[in-house]
Amino acid sequence: MCATAVLLGATLVTAAVPAVAAPVAAPAAATVCPTGWGSTDKAVTAATSTSVRDVRTGRHDCYDRMVVDVPGAARADLGYSVRYVDRLQQDGSGRHIPVSGGAILEVRVNAPAYAPETGEATYPARAGRALPGVDLTGYRTFRDARFAGSFEGDTQLGLGVRGRLPFRVQQLDGRLVIDVAHNWTGAAAR
């Protein structure tokens, strides 16, 4: 009986405590994404004999990113050409490399994917195949990434994207960065 009275008393005290509303969280600030990149061809004519070592990708609020690593290359020496194409045609042979997606960005880096002195591959990719180590599962814009080859000191990649979206290219020491926006409006996904 004593235990019942204690439990009943605890229940009554708990019920008598007024309910307090939890503080309302302020709405998150909307992310504003850049939209002024455009979708026209972008190119810089510089070149380096420093070799491509890796290609990796990442997801961001406003864009998907591809990074071509060329360790040791100075920013000013990293030439490139990035443009939308109807079909990816391999340099030298002209062979068609199928790339999935609503649009195809051809990425040319003016750097070899092999050691110029020996011809030995420095990036373990095979022509026509998906880029090694690149998994595009869950990306909003990227759909496919293919290696087309490395010919006469240039490395050619195909990047399949959802549609013909704005993109930018940035030269940094040791890497070339290609960002493709998720949309034209500048609104981030929630």
Image: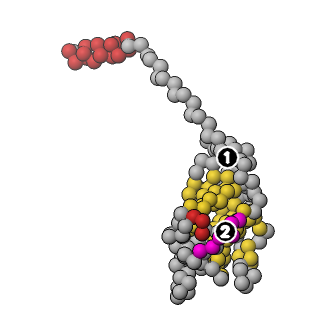
Foreground residue among 73 and 66: 73
Residue 86 left/right relative to 14: right
Q: Which mark is residue 86?
A: none
For discs 2 and 1, the disc positioned in front in the rendered view: 2
Main SS category, magenta section: loop
Q: Which residues are magenta?
A: 43-48
Residue drawn at x 77%, y 68% is 85
Badge 1 is on which residue?
34
Foreground residue among 173 and 13: 173
Identify the secondary structure beneath mark 1.
Answer: loop
Can residue 68 be seen in the rendering of this structure?
Answer: yes
Disc tally is 2
Q: CA distance from mark 2 to mark 1?
A: 22 Å
Residue 15 pos. (x, y %): 38, 14
Residue 180 pos. (x, y %): 67, 56
- Based on the displayed image, in which of its 4 quarters is residue 170 positioned? bottom right
Residue 124 pos. (x, y %): 53, 78
Q: Is residue 62 above or below residue 72?
A: above
Q: Residues within 10 Å of mark 2 (few under 14, many from 20)?
A: many
Badge 2 is on which residue?
80
